[in-house]
Amino acid sequence: MGKGFRATTSGLVGILLTAFIASLAICRLGTSTAAADPEPRASIFFRAPWGTGGPTLGMRLPGGEPSEPGMAPQAFQYTSDGTLWILDSLNNRVVAFRGGTLAETISTERLVYRPRLFAVSGAYLYLADGAEWGTRLYRWDEGRYGWMGGLTDPNGDRLFTTRMHGLWDGKVLLTGTAHPWELSDETQPASQFFAAVLDPTGVRVAYYKPTEGAAVADPQGRIYFARALADQEADRLPMRVLAERGDGSWYTVHSFVLPRNPELAAQRPRAIRIPLGFDLEGNFYVALEEGRSLRTTFFRVDPQGQVTASATTEQLGIDDTGISELFDCEGYQVLADGSILAMYPVREEFRICKITL
């Protein structure tokens, strides 16, 4: 994270110099706006050079002899105490930064080699490792790892986790696919999507299979499912957010349509709708990746289902044409105030940008 600057001169000259230098750290390249007329903006929230240890983070581009996949930090999580946790996969560790300074390093090498999934919740850090019988889950507590066991569902199906996210009070949200050990008949699906919430001891407190869409959580820890709907119109991308009633049925919390760029809509490129989550005001956030370059547009949807703000990475001045597309990583987090943290590594350094719609 960039170092702060302090004026070294007095009076008006010092104030102007401080304001000018501080403005250089802004990620957005456009002109500034007055507070009375806010518009979407972005700034660099965290940055670190590439390297093999200390405050640097590991990065490897695809290729080489023999050909190797690209790898960079696979995930991050910013917690309410102001700590930024980063899964530094290539260097086999989890690192924590506070105030831009490296505060903690936790090795994963002897347990999970180059991990791709982690989560932080309460006092616990979780790691996941895959095997042919499903995901194995570990918890870091008081300076050591404890095995929480392999994951199976109530029917005994093997659970393969593809995403983890820390909730509150030590709970963790897992999503992925459930696979039976063997198929009982031809009508049984070979796999189904699942979502599960585990308490700090590994006990399931909620389980869904098949899921009603992509699982997201609000700041209070309630689980919702966001579903992308089909539409015959090229410029319409409808979505629906569902919640569960006490009797196990589902009801619609949000129903809205994302507008598309007219030029891209006419070309009908693939459009990936990524549910990001809720803020404290009940607004819902979505990232839309579309086109060959997967240009990203961020949307804010209010509790009445109205799109109240949107911005593209181009409008925000974010460089998303660097090396982000080379890595499969968990790159977004919605904070309680509605800010979006987005991971955008470039060839020179690792970056997380903070977006305000």
Image: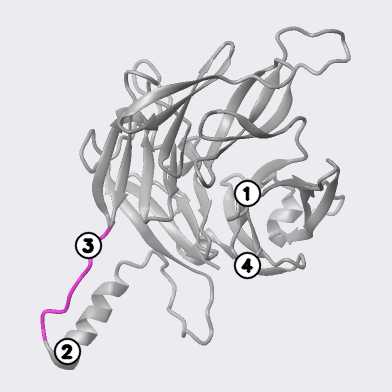
Distance CA(mark 3)–CA(mark 2)? 21 Å
Which mark is nearer the camera, 3 or 2? 3
Q: Which residue is mark 3?
A: 3
Name the residue carrying label 1.
Answer: 217
Q: Quadrant of the C terminus?
A: bottom right
Q: Residues within 10 Å of mark 2 (few under 14, many from 20)?
A: few
Disc 2 target residue: 13
Gap between marks 1 and 4, in whole Å?
Answer: 14 Å
Vertical placement of residue 26 versus 53, above or below = below
Q: Which of the labelled discs sits on residue 16, or is there none?
A: none
Label 2: which secondary element: helix
In the rendering, at what x and y percent does residue 119 appear? Answer: 47, 38
Image quadrant assignment for residue 61: top left
Residue at 17%, 75% in the rendered image: 6
Residue nearest the observer in this picture, 240 or 110 = 110
Q: Amino acid at mark 3?
A: Lys
Residue type beneath disc 4 = Glu
- List x then y, in percent, for residue 287: 61, 53
Would you name the residue on which mark 4 appears?
Answer: 281
| Residues rendered magenta in the picture | 1-9
Location of residue 254 (image quadrant): bottom right
Q: Disc 2 to disc 4, how far (Cα)?
A: 41 Å
What is the spatial separation of the Cα atoms under label 4 and label 3, in whole angstroms?
Answer: 32 Å
Asked whether the viewer can see residue 288, the reply is no
- Kind of element beneath mark 1: strand
